[in-house]
Every structure is written in structure tokens, then in C-alpha cells.
Image (spheres, rainbow, N blue to C red):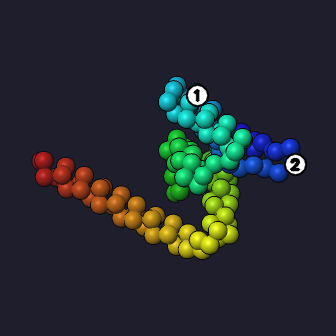
Amino acid sequence: MPLQKSATGDIDYIDNMLADNLSTATSKGMAKESLRAKNLLESYRENGLTMSEINEAKRFMSKNNKFSYFSDDTSPRKGFVTQIDNEVRKWQFATAKEQGFGNLQEINKQTKAYFKLLDGITKWSEGTQGNNAL
């Protein structure tokens, strides 16, 4: 899926992400998510979105596009999703810094570390529960 350009010729990564979310939700028959994606896209094009709404859209895209970091998947879809995710993240960091929140990258790293720890505990717990059931 090629990235769409705005009238000025620039790539609008947030618009691309929102449009892709709407397309994904519609094609998967996800009525509630499709309506929310449509509302976010319309709101973005009219007035813009809050950081919270942009994060909601990023979570939806991540949830519906699972790729392993360890695979050699070079599909156009993975490239498209990764590029959008990276550019939106860069924009968020730059915007946060402009607004006086220079520590957003550090908070992001800590949050990722907590999620990795939680994933590890969950996998370990599932394994021990399975072993204990034997």
C-alpha cells in the first residue's frame, strides 16, 4: 500500500495510519472499530487529534499488524506499517519536546521495559502452571 501525499506533496503519516485503520477494520468486519476509526479520521481531517487519540490509533494499528522482529519478513505491508509507526513516533517526540516534555523518550523506554518484564512473567507463569497441572 503506497503512502498517500497531502495537497502540499508531503506525506501525512497520521492520515495514512488512520485511513489504514479504517480499511483494516472494515475489511475484517469489525463494526465498532470501523466506526471509531472513521470518527478519528474525520476528526483528524477537520480539527486534528489529541495525543491520546493518536496513541489509540497507533495501538489499533499495532494490534492488527503483528510482525516478529526476528523474522526476515520483508513484505510491503511490514514496511508500510513500520514506516508509519516510526514517523508518527518521531512526530510525537518532537511535539512533546516543543511543549516542554523532553523526557518522553525516557518514559517510552521505561514503559517498554515494563511490558517486556510483564510478558516474561506471564510466559513463565503459564509455563509453571502447565507444569504444575501434570
Which secondary structure lies at badge 1? helix
Query: Do the numbered discs 2 and 1 sit on residues whose CB atoms are within 8 Å?
Result: no
Please tell me whether mark 2 or mark 1 is closer to you in this view: 2
Q: In this view, does 43 lie above or below 87?
A: above
Is residue 94 visible in this depiction of the protein? yes
Which secondary structure lies at badge 2? loop
Residue type (three-letter) at the residue carrying disc 1 = Thr
Q: Quadrant of residue 99?
A: bottom right
Residue 57 left/right relative to 10: left
Give the residue at x 66% y 51%.
84
Residue 109 left/right relative to 118: right
Is residue 55 visible in this depiction of the protein? no
How far from the left and from the top, in percent, is residue 78?
62, 47
Disc 2 residue crowd, few under 14, some 14–19, many 20+, Cα 10 Å: few
Q: In which quarter of the image is residue 4?
A: top right
* Label 2 sits on residue: 8
* Label 1 sits on residue: 26
Residue type (three-letter) at the residue carrying disc 2 = Thr
Q: In this view, does 20 lie above or below 91?
A: above
Closer to the chain start, of discs 2 and 1, is: 2
Residue 30 left/right relative to 23: left
Q: In which quarter of the image is residue 75?
A: top right
Give the residue at x 49% y 69%.
107
How far from the left and from the top, in percent, is residue 126?
25, 52
Observer-nearest residue: 128 or 2?
Answer: 2
How far from the left and from the top, in percent, is residue 122?
29, 56
